[in-house]
Amino acid sequence: MGLKSRIITIVVFACSIINLFLCFYITEQIKTLEFQSLRIKIDKAAYMMRLVNARPLYNVDKETLRVNLETFFDDPNMKSIFIQESEIDLDLHLSREFKSKGLEIQKSFFIYHKGLKLGKMKVVYSTSLIEKKLAGFRNQMLYFTFTITLCLALILTLLIHKLMQPVTKLTQAASEIAAGNLEREIEINGVGEIGDLARNFSSMRDAIQEKINDLALTNKNLEAEICLKEENEKKILHQSICISSVNTFFQRSMLAKSYREVAELFIPIALAIIPSRYCFVGELSGDEPGQIEMLAVSDGVMADCPLDMGHNPLVQGKELRGILARVIFEKVSLISNDPSSHPDFVEIPENHIPIDSFLGVPIKLGATVKGIVAFAGKENGYDEGDKESAQMLTVALIEALSLKKKEDEKRTLEEMMVQSEKMVSLGGLAAGMAHEINNPLAGILQNSQVIQNRLKTKLPANIAAARQTGIDLDLLETYMEKRGIFKMLDSVLDAGKRAAAIVSNMLSFSRKSASGFVPEDIGLLLDQTLELAESDYNLKKRFDFKKIEIKRDYAKGLPRIYCKASELQQVFFNILSNGAQAMMGIEETRVSPCFVLKIFKEDSMLCVQIRDNGPGMAPDTRKRVFEPFFTTKIVGEGTGLGLAVSYFIITENHKGHIEVTSRPGQGTSFLIKLPLNLRGSQ
C-alpha cells in the first residue's frame, strides 16, 4: 500500500476513529443536554401546573382541570399525567404508550392554595422519542463517516456549534421565564426538536401569561365584588339598626307624658345611631315668626353651654338665622364638615358652643316644615349615610310628635267638654244661690245705710227723736267716733258690697239673654280694656301697668261681630289682670313684662290671642284654671270666679271657645274664638 493510501488510510482511519468518537461523544452530549432541558422543562411545567391548577382545584372546577391537563399533555415527551384528591373524589388521568423503551422521569408534587394543601399531581415523562431521534442521528453520522470523513469533521464542528447555540438561547430564555420574566422573547425560527421546543416554550409562556392575566382580572373583580358586598352588608346592618331604633322610639313615645318628653326621648336614640357631641330638636314658634323653640337638647349642649349666655337654652326662643334658617326655609338636609369656611357660620358668637361639624334635617309634616333636628360635633364629620339615618329618624319623630299633639288636643277638648258640663250644672246652682243670698244681703246693705243716716246726719226726724229722748246728737256722734262704730258700719257696707259683687258674678252663669248684642270692633274693645286696666286702682296699688310693654298684631280688614261689649271687656280685663299680676309678681326677672295681643280671622271664627311672658303655669293649674272658686292667690285677694265667668261668657253667651296654653317658665297664652255669624244664632 502506498503512502497516499496509507495517509488516506491513516487519515481515514484516524478520521473514522475521530468521527466515531465524535459521533458517540456528540450523541451523548446532545442526549445529556436534551435530558437536562427536559428536566428543566419538567420543573417549569410542574411549577406552572401548581400555579394554574390551584384555583380550579380549590373551587372543584373539574372541567377547567381537565382542560389544563389536556393542554399540558400536548407535550409529546409526556407519558402520563394525573391529579388525585380523595376528599372530593377527584381522579383525572391522561397517558400514552411509546413503541420504544426509554428512561422514565417522574415528578410528583402537591398543589397548595393560600397555604391549604389540596390534591396530589404526578407527571411522567419518557425519553423514548429523544433516544429514538438520537439513534437515527448517530446512524446518519456513521453513514457519512465512511464517505466524507474530513467534511464530516468540519460539518460536525459547525453543526455542534450551530446546534448548541439555539439550545443555549432557549435555556437562557427558560431560566428568565422561570425567574418570572414572562416578557422574554423566544426565537422560534429553529427547526426540528429545537424549533419545536422553542415554539412549545413560547406557547407555554403565552398560555401562562394569559392565565396569570385572567387570574389577576378574576382576583380584581372578586375583590371589587367582595368590597361591594361588604359595603351593602354594612348598609343593611345600619338600616336594620335604624329601623330597630325607630321601633324602640315609637314604643317609648307612646308612654311619654308630654309633647316635650317625646323630643327628649328622641335625643339619646338618635345619638346612638349618629354619634355626636351635640344634638337638639327645635320647633318653629307659632307666636314669634323667625324664632325657634328648643324642645330638647343633648347633655353635651347643657354641659358645654357657656354660663354667660344668660339663659337656659331649653326655655328661651332662638333667633332663626344662618344654616338653621337655610335648612328650614330651603326644606333640605345640609352637611357642613368645615364650619370655619362655611358662609352660614361666619357670625357665630364667641360664647357659642364649639361646632366643628354640622348636620341639619328639617322636620316636615307633608310639605310644611315644623322644625329642625340638628347634630354637631361628630368626629371625622358627617356623611351621606348619617344624613339618610337622620332623615329616617326625623320621619319617626314628626309622626310621634303629631300623635302626641293629637292626644293633647283630644285631652284638651275633653277637658273643655267637662268644663262646659261643670258650667252648665253650676249655672243653675249659682242662680239659685244668688237669689237666696241676694234678698238678705240687700236687707243688710239697706239697713246699714239707714243706721249710718240716722246716726251721722242731722235730719229733722233725727233731731226730733233726740229731743224727745233727751240725747245730744253731737255727743252721740263723738261717742260713736271714739268707739269706732262708724268704721264698723263702713266695714259692714264694704263686706256687703263685696258679697253683692260675688253674687253678681254668680248670676252671670245663668244670664243668656241676647239683649245688648250689637256689631263691635274687637280691636277697639281690646284697646279700651287696656286703658281701663291702666287706670284700675287695684292694679296700680301693686304696680304700674304702664310699665308693661304692649305689642299689637291686629289683622287688617277684620269684620265687626255681634257681641256684648261689656261682657267681652270683662273677659279681656280678667285675663289682662291675671297676667299682669303674674308677671309683676316675679321678684327677679331678666325679661321685661310684655303682653302680645293678636287678632286674626280663622275660617268662620274671629280669634283673639292674649299672651304674656310671665312664669307660666304647671299642668295641674292649667287644667283647673276655668273652675269656679279655684285660685292660686292668697286668701282675700281673689274669689276664683274671674276666669270661670269669662269661660261662661265666651262659651255660653257668645257660643265661642276659649283655651289656655302654658308651660312653666314660658308664659301663658289665652286664645278666644268668636263666631262671625253670631247674630243669626241669637
Image (tube, rainbow, N blue to C red):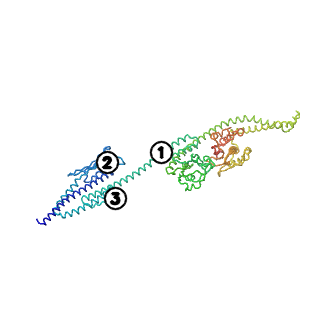
Q: Which class describes the residues within 10 Å of circle 1: few (<14), some (14-19), or many (20+)?
A: few
**Residues under labels 1 and 3: Cα distance?**
52 Å
Q: Single out the residue that lies furthest toward the front.
A: 3
Percent across and percent down for residue 170 are: 29, 59
Q: Nearer the viewer, residue 31 or 272?
A: 31
Percent across and percent down for residue 391 are: 52, 48
Q: Quadrant of the N terminus?
A: bottom left
Label 3 vs 2, first from the N-terminus: 2
455 relative to 573 in the view: left or right: right
Helix, strand or loop at label 1? It is: helix
Percent across and percent down for residue 631 are: 68, 39
Mark 2: amino acid: Phe
Contact between marks 1 and 3 (CB within 8 A): the answer is no
382 relative to 531 in the view: left or right: left
Helix, strand or loop at label 3? It is: loop
Write down the residue under mark 2: 110
**Residues under labels 3 and 2: Cα distance?**
28 Å
Label 2 vs 1, first from the N-terminus: 2
Q: Single out the residue that lies furthest toward the left.
A: 1
Residue 517 visible in the displayed image: no
Percent across and percent down for residue 285 are: 60, 48
Mark 3: amino acid: Glu
Q: Mark on residue 183?
A: 3
Residue 414, compared with residue 125, is above or below; it is above
Q: Single out the residue that lies furthest toward the top.
A: 469
Q: Mark on residue 240?
A: 1
